[in-house]
Image (cartoon, rainbow, N blue to C red):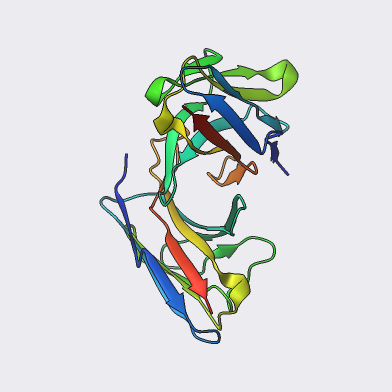
Amino acid sequence: AQSVTQPDIHITVSEGASLELRCNYSYGATPYLFWYVQSPGQGLQLLLKYFSGDTLVQGIKGFEAEFKRSQSSFNLRKPSVHWSDAAEYFCAVGEDDYKLSFGAGTTVTVRA
Amino acid sequence: SAVISQKPSRDICQRGTSLTIQCQVDSQVTMMFWYRQQPGQSLTLIATANQGSEATYESGFVIDKFPISRPNLTFSTLTVSNMSPEDSSIYLCSVTRSRGPEYTEAFFGQGTRLTVV
């Protein structure tokens, strides 16, 4: 069975500072990896995905993530955080039957 | 992408009653799923909604408690039966649209926030 670990439950970052959210997964084959964002009272929005190819993927809202097979990681980064980036972020791993296993989530707070 | 409409968006229900949640997609999709997000928790897959046949449930979820229908490729319902306060959660519908052998991402509805009192 797959598992996803997001080690950081809560991160506080200043507006304009950089942000990195960690994600580690356990999966036997090449994984399908995703980052979703959930703003208060909203559904999940896909930020970016990795299926194959270039290990550095670009997403929406200025986010990027890097797949590192040797570390079983798929960390999410943003160079300069905006107040609107305050939200819950979920890393997920997809299986061949399109089911998703989610990490516990990381809450990002942005301070002025 | 896919536009997913979930109804109701939220509800407050008495324990012992049942609530049916609807998920409507704007175009035909291959896979439809139902997830639960308990307060302060991550998402857990309840079941895969199969068109014209019984849903496939994940460990810990049973049809008597969470009956699911999927009469066509664009619509599904999830019923939360005989509710208790422990069923208070956000329930989310998710869909994927197959593109041949390529893997595709999942899209989510806005969710139904259920409170059982």
Q: How far from the left and from the top, in percent, is residue B37?
A: 56, 56
Residue at the far front in the pictured view: A112
- Count all numbered tags in the image, as a single digit: 0
Residue closest to the eye, A52 or A47:
A47
Q: Return the residue nearer the eye: B34 or A9.
A: A9
Q: Is residue B102 visible?
A: no
Q: Is residue B49 left or right of residue A100?
A: left
Q: Work out whether residue A86 or residue A72 is closer to the camera in this orientation and state it.
A: A86
Can residue A62 be spotted in the picture?
yes
Which residue lies most toward the left here?
B26
Is A70 drawn above or below residue A83 in the view shown?
Answer: above
- Of the 4 image quadrants, the one containing the N terminus of chain B is top left
Residue A59 image position (x, y, % from top left)? 42, 23
Which quarter of the figure has residue B44? bottom right
Quarter of the C terminus of chain B within the rendering: bottom right
Where is residue A72 drawn, in percent x and y? 71, 24
Q: Nearer the viewer, residue A28 or A112?
A: A112
In the figure, A31 relative to B63: above or below?
A: above
Q: Residue at x 60, y 49 (%)?
A: B42
Give the vertical position of B35 relative to A12 (above or below): below
For image coordinates 41% across by 20% down, the residue present is A62
Tell whether A59 sits left or right of A54: left
At a point 65% along the width and 27% down the height, the residue shown is: A22
Q: Residue B35 in the image: state x and y as whole percent.
A: 53, 57
Furthest-bottom residue in this view: B16
Left or right position of A43 against A35: left
